[in-house]
Amino acid sequence: MSLATKGKITNVQELMALSKKVRGSILQMLTKSGSGHTGGSLSAADIAVAIYFSKMNYNADNPSMPERDRFIMSKGHAAPLVYAIMAEAGYFHTDTMNTLRTIESPLQGHPCCQKLPGIEVSTGSLGQGLSVANGMALGLRLDKNPARVFCIMGDGEIQEGQVWEAAMTSAHYGIDSLCAVVDCNGLQIDGPVEKVMNINPVGDKWRAFGWHVIEIDGHDMQQILSALDEAEKTKGKPTAIIANTTKGKGVSFFENKVEYHGVTPSEEQLVKALEEINNG
Amino acid sequence: MGERPGTEQIDETTDASGVKKPKATRDAYGDTLLELGKEREDIVTLDADLSGSTKTAKFAKAFPDRFFNIGIAEQDMVGTAAGLALTGKVPFASTFAVFETGRAWDQIRLTVCYSNTNVKLVATHSGITVGEDGASHQALEDVALMRALPNMTVIVPSDAAETSLAIRAVADFLGPVYVRLGRAKVPYVMPDNYEFKIGKAHVFSTGKDANIIANGLMVDMAVRAAEMLKLEGIDCGVINMSTVKPLDEVALLAAAKASKILVTAEEHSIIGGLGSAVCEFISEHSPMPVKRVGVLDTFGCSGDPDELLKFHGLTAENIATTVRNAL
């Protein structure tokens, strides 16, 4: 039975088991493709798994179902994470993951909504997802559709000015159906975020922009679930979950290593990495 | 007149000799958008703090719940429009052409064209007839920027009546569209019975010596240039190529086969706009001399719109001279 028909999962142990499975799929997918983004896919895995499987109303057999909740991976380089979750949810056969980043594949290097039903909008050029999320939420509001909108951004990504344009719009229009997550793994391609272009204090920035802010450990499933509940109950303003995470989470030799932003595991590393994840 | 959709709100005010007074294409847009808002619930409008100038303010006043002022944030405006389109709305997003296409180009590329969302980008204040505000505000590259994007349709209406018809066609069309409008009042040039169709050029006449391919406010000048040339015994035709992409290749090929030379005329840089589009097609399918009238590879400057048109050679006289010299 696919998870699409199984309903929402709120059991912490069950969600953590799904996170492990999703991390394994990410690593296998990336090893096979030989290119792609390892660190940022692993850092956001627990949050994305919790959003999809504990909160979202979706239908893998009917991806354009009007009452579905919307999910946007604004940091599009975490595409392998999205694909691993969608495979688990039943949007496509798990074998499709082996085609990542190949010419005819629906699994493009960055998510493409024209090639993969279930991807709401194409991403990859950073900083754009939140604007689209706002537009969706405003459209749903006009239709009196209670569907919610989730948007995951990276901490490096919020250096893009458009993010703050969108942050103003969300608050200005009081978009409380929107829950944004900033995956704060502390690293970007050229080094530590605070060294490349400091974004701190992150929470204060979102608060100053009129958002309800919840700061959590982005790998503590109980904290993630509580934050998602709080976001849903918060009315009149959008919610930003500032999730402190570890880049490469789950694999000791990838964790906090900036060089594994866009480098994939070797075959030998994969064996060891899967071992660590399964025993972790 | 009056019964045909899209024509009811055209300013029919005429001068003493019975000729309709000039009207800005942006004014026709504002009027038609308001009418569409009354007819269709799915039409929504966005602006970036220029609704008074782009004329979306009329829609905003009538339908405040369906109007979203995003402030001075064009990139966010385009992304928000894409999101609205993804929930089944038909968003019209407007600001000045230079900001709409330049400031938000990557957003248009990713969330409108690559995502193939049903967003209508209707920009005003294109070209040098923006006038006194000067080069920073005069978009001369916008058609080039939009034409290069896959999935994008690009329309440059010639007068207020064609604008109304085009906006209605765009609202019915599924997919990304860029419509280029102007600030200045322009004379009516299209015939009363004209029917606008996306991708279909209007052939005023076909010349045996030359044919002028024009769009926007240059269509009126092209018609006048052809009249001047006729007095000199030069048989020159005129085509209004209001859809730059997709180009009406059938009409273009017919004009090419009929005459010795082609001349293009546009209120845009000669790089990347209508002139380039015509040259690209003609060089591959019917090689022949093509001369381009437009703004040369330079920025505009402040000045009275009519004086600026003369300064840049965007006149009936210069089109006629270009035809003469080429023959």
Image (cartoon, rainbow, N blue to C red):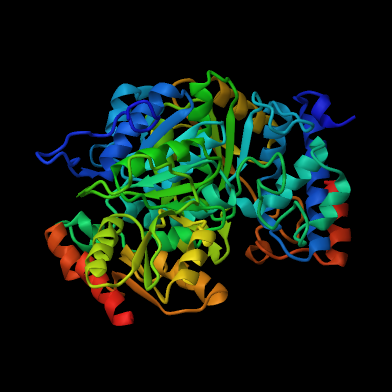
| Viewer-side residue, B23 vs B38 | B23
Task: Describe residue B233's horizontal placement relative to residue B145 as left or right.
Answer: left
Residue A208 x %, y %:
37, 37
Q: How many marks?
A: 0
- For the point 18% across and 61% down, which residue is it? B134
The answer to which image quadrant residue A192 occupies is bottom right
- For the point 66% across and 28% down, which residue is it? A225
| Viewer-side residue, A84 vs A257 | A84
The answer to which image quadrant residue A210 occupies is top left
> Residue A201: in sight, yes or no?
no
Residue B135 x %, y %:
22, 63
- For the point 52% across and 48% down, which residue is it? B112
> Residue B10: in sight, yes or no?
yes
Q: Indicate the quadrant containing the N terminus of chain B: top left, top right, bottom left or bottom right.
A: top left
Image height check: is A54 above or below A261? above
Task: Describe residue B303's horizontal placement relative to residue A48 as left or right.
Answer: left
Image height check: is B266 above or below A228? below
Image height check: is A205 above or below A57? below
